[in-house]
């Protein structure tokens, strides 16, 4: 898509927020020429070890990407490049292919941009959800017990792991992040039973709303819409001007569009054309 000046600025803020989140998680970042390497010394999650373009540019040299791949390989990490495609010319894809890399994955980036103005009778405007949802409540995690509930609900929603045992060490990073003002954690309750969890991360005037984790029997009851909308309101309360989400599954696209999000870019992943 063709971006105007304002949208390009918003994408740059999203780009910076993604790197900020990686560094908050404990990853180191080193720049050389037109590329940079994000590396986590403990975690093997590819989210925290990758090659990215140097911040603020619209082109990365193939030899710099190659150097980044070699750096990750030497440290036992999966070598891959990620960038926001709307910030780069179409020729950049061909440039990478000519240097021995191939396209691997597109992950959508959704920007909150609700429509305002007259609404036809009987229709709900984008960016709003009905608030008369019976038996659904939203609770912010504040205490240690709240975070234990949030973590159990999150695990049950994303991984199908349903247990009542919670390791305090697993909860502490979330509590610390909350205390530093970097994140908020919301719990969705149906008839007072925890059924969904979501988190919002903040960096300056930018916020990322994660996809809600909903325990399977309660999916589709309207709790997803409520969690996302309240997460947006939390972000706006924190003074955030750019609110976005990453990696929404294709079958949830209409849900996010109805709530006021538009797809503004993709996070494009490139890997070795011929794995070593």
Image (cartoon, grey):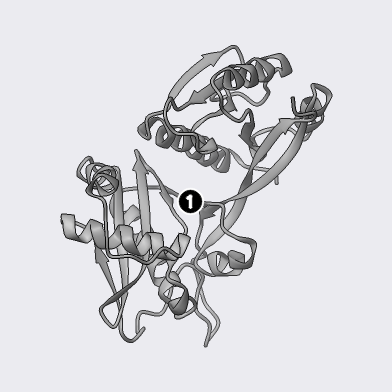
Q: Dot 1, how many residues are within 10 Å of its Cα: few (below 14), some (14-19), or many (20+)? A: many
Q: Quadrant of residue 164?
A: bottom left
- Could you tell whether 160 is left or right of 141 in the image? right
Identity of the residue drawn at 30% across and 56% down: 185
Identity of the residue drawn at 53% across and 25% down: 55
- Could you tell whether 154 is left or right of 238 in the image? right
Helix, strand or loop under label 1:
strand
Q: Position of residue 245 (x, y in %)?
A: 50, 52
- Residue 107 position (above or below residue 125): above
Q: Position of residue 120 (x, y in %)?
A: 55, 82
- Residue ranking furthest to the top: 33
Q: Position of residue 238 (x, y in %)?
A: 29, 50
Identity of the residue drawn at 41% across and 80% down: 130
Identity of the residue drawn at 63% across and 67% down: 251
In front: 64, or 237? Answer: 64
Q: How many marks?
A: 1
In front: 51, or 61? Answer: 51
Q: Quadrant of residue 95?
A: top right
- Residue 41 position (above or below residue 178): above
- Could you tell whether 11 is left or right of 135 in the image? right
In front: 192, or 78? Answer: 78
- Residue 261 position (above or below residue 50): below
Tell me the quadrant of the picture where the C terminus can be found. top right
Label 1 sits on residue: 244
- Could you tell whether 253 is left or right of 149 in the image? right
């Amino acid at each position: 898509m063709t971006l105007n000046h304002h949208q390009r600025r918003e994408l740059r803020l999203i780009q910076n927020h993604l790197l900020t989140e990686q560094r908050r998680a404990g990853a180191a970042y080193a720049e050389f020429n037109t590329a940079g390497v994000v590396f986590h010394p403990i975690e093997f999650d590819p989210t925290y070890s990758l090659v990215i373009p140097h911040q603020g540019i619209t082109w990365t040299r193939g030899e710099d990407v190659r150097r980044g791949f070699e750096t990750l390989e030497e440290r036992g990490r999966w070598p891959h490049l990620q960038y926001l495609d709307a910030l780069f010319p179409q020729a950049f894809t061909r440039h990478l292919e000519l240097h021995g890399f191939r396209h691997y994955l597109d992950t959508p980036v959704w920007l909150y941009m609700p429509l305002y103005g007259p609404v036809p009778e009987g229709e709900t405007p984008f960016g709003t959800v009905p608030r008369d949802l019976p038996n659904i409540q939203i609770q912010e995690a504040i205490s240690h017990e709240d975070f234990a509930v949030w973590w159990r609900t999150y695990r049950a929603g994303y991984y199908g792991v349903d247990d009542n045992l919670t390791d305090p060490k697993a909860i502490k990073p979330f509590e610390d992040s909350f205390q530093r003002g970097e994140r908020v954690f919301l719990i969705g309750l149906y008839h007072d039973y925890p059924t969904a969890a979501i988190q919002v991360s903040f960096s300056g005037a930018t916020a990322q709303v994660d996809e809600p984790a909903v325990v399977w029997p309660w999916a589709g009851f309207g709790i997803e819409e409520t969690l996302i909308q309240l997460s947006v309101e939390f972000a706006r309360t924190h003074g955030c001007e750019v609110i976005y989400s990453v990696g929404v599954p294709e079958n949830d696209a209409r849900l996010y569009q109805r709530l006021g999000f538009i797809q503004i870019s993709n996070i494009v992943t490139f890997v070795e054309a011929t794995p070593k």
